[in-house]
Amino acid sequence: MAKTGKAAGEGSFEESLKQLESLVEQMESPELPLETIVEKYELGMKLVGVCSEKLKAAEKRITLLTKKKNGSIEEGELEEMGGEPHKSLHGKKAGRGAPDLLI
């Protein structure tokens, strides 16, 4: 397959993901020598890291909007995956001041 001239992970998340998908397809060929498969695997792992970093950066940019009972909107930062739950969303029983998420 022809290379795009970009180093692994350069460009958008979507481009990096397409590069990764292409590598997976190439690695599934039973005709590739072991050394080529290992090289493609190394490049794929770099792309996985790049995609992961881009996802983390995007996640940090997302804000969570909640609607309070009085109709006002509250804006807060989205907690990172695996972090503590957002205070205004957890720890309260429904109907007792728990905000509704705007979707």
Image (cartoon, grey):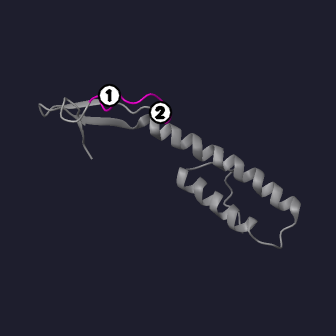
Does residue 84 belong to the magenta stretch?
Answer: yes
Q: Is residue 83 left or right of residue 40?
A: left
**Residue 63 % position (x, y):** 35, 35
Q: Residue at x 22, y 36 (%)?
A: 94
Q: Main secondary structure of the magenta part?
A: loop
**Quarter of the N terminus within the rendering:** bottom right
Among the two numbered marks 1 and 2 on one chain, the one whose residue lies closer to the N terminus: 2
Comparing 78 with 36, the one in front is 78
* Image: magenta residue range: 80-92
The picture quadrant where one finds residue 60 is top left
The picture quadrant where one finds residue 22 is bottom right
Give the Cα distance between marks 1 and 2.
18 Å
Q: Is residue 35 left or right of residue 67?
A: right
- Residue 35's place in the image compared with 58, above or below, is below
SS at badge 2? loop
Q: Residue at label 1? A: 91
| Number of marks drawn | 2
Does residue 36 belong to the magenta stretch?
Answer: no
**Residue 6 % position (x, y):** 67, 53
The picture quadrant where one finds residue 86 is top left
Q: Say whether marks 1 and 2 touch (CB < 8 Å).
A: no
For residue 20, which numbered disc appears in the image?
none
Q: Amino acid at mark 1?
A: Gly
Mark 1, residues whose alpha carbon is within 10 Å: few (<14), some, or many (≥20)?
Answer: few
Q: Residue at x 77, y 50 (%)?
A: 42
**Residue 35 % position (x, y):** 88, 59
Q: Amino acid at mark 2?
A: Glu
Q: Residue at label 2? A: 80
Q: Is residue 59 left or right of residue 63?
A: right
Between label 1 and label 2, give the one nearer the viewer.
Answer: 1
Q: Residue at x 48, y 30 (%)?
A: 83
